[in-house]
Image: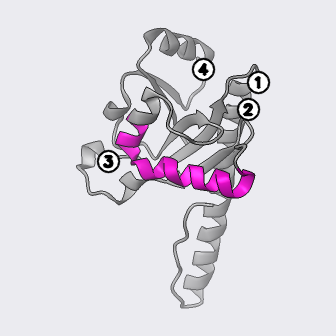
Amino acid sequence: MRLLICDADEQFCDAARRHFSGQEHVEVTHGRLEDLPGDVDCVVWPGNCQALPASRLDAALAALLGAATLEHARARILDEFGDDGCPIGTTFLLPTAASSRASQADSRPPPCAAFVAVFPRCREGPGLAMRGVLEAVARYNDAALAEASAAAAVQMAGGRPQRGGFP
């Protein structure tokens, strides 16, 4: 897995480059979300504990991934945590509305978003957010491996495997 960190703030990018120097699979890019390369599979959506649109970043991510992505996060938070919202660091992997749109090969929108609750800000927030994202990716990878193993077993038995969704 390759981690691509993209931000419009050059100072943030410089700090991220220093922090992740020596990390083989981490790339820091100064730029805009809309200019991400076409091979990005997932974008982290840092949001508030209720998944309510509240910032220009939310607007940019909704334009890139589809407003339904945030609505899906909101519905899941309401279902699992109620009106008070989720704890900081809670992360959900969600299919994006962009994943169903046809697009040019060079500018394929990412098919997945990792919504992570990072607001309201707190001292532990960044660490909890990073941990939440990494745990969500690990759960997804575990599920994908189990699905691939099951599909291989079904194929060996002469059946047809079914492709699952996001955990």
Label 4 and label 2: CA atoms lie apart by 18 Å
- Mark 3 residue element: loop
Amino acid, disc 1: Glu
Main SS of the magenta part reads helix
Q: Which residue is mark 3?
A: 108
Amino acid, disc 3: Arg
Whether residue 79 sits left or right of residue 100 in the image: it is right
Which numbered disc, 4 or 2, marks the residue that appears first in the sequence? 4
Q: Which residue is mark 1?
A: 124
Circle 1/circle 2 CB separation < 8 Å: yes
Whether residue 58 sits left or right of residue 49 in the image: it is left
- Mark 4 residue element: loop
Amino acid, disc 4: Phe
Find residue 20 and name its label: 4
Other-residue count near label 4 (Cα within 10 Å), few / some / many at <14 / 14–19 / ≥20? few
Of 120 and 27, the residue lying toward us:
120
Residue range in magenta is 60-82
Of 63 and 159, the residue lying toward us:
63
Q: How far from the left and from the top, in percent, is residue 113?
A: 51, 46
**Going 66% across and 48% down the picture, which residue do you hit?**
136
Label 3 and label 2: CA atoms lie apart by 30 Å
Q: How far from the left and from the top, in percent, is residue 90?
A: 70, 42
Label 3 and label 1: CA atoms lie apart by 34 Å
Quadrant position of residue 30: top left
Q: Which residue is mark 2?
A: 128
**Going 72% across and 51% down the picture, which residue do you hit?**
82
Label 1 and label 4: CA atoms lie apart by 19 Å
Other-residue count near label 3 (Cα within 10 Å), few / some / many at <14 / 14–19 / ≥20? some
**Going 57% across and 50% down the picture, which residue do you hit?**
73
Question: With respect to residue 122, does 134 lie above or below?
Answer: below
Give the residue furthest to the bottom: 158
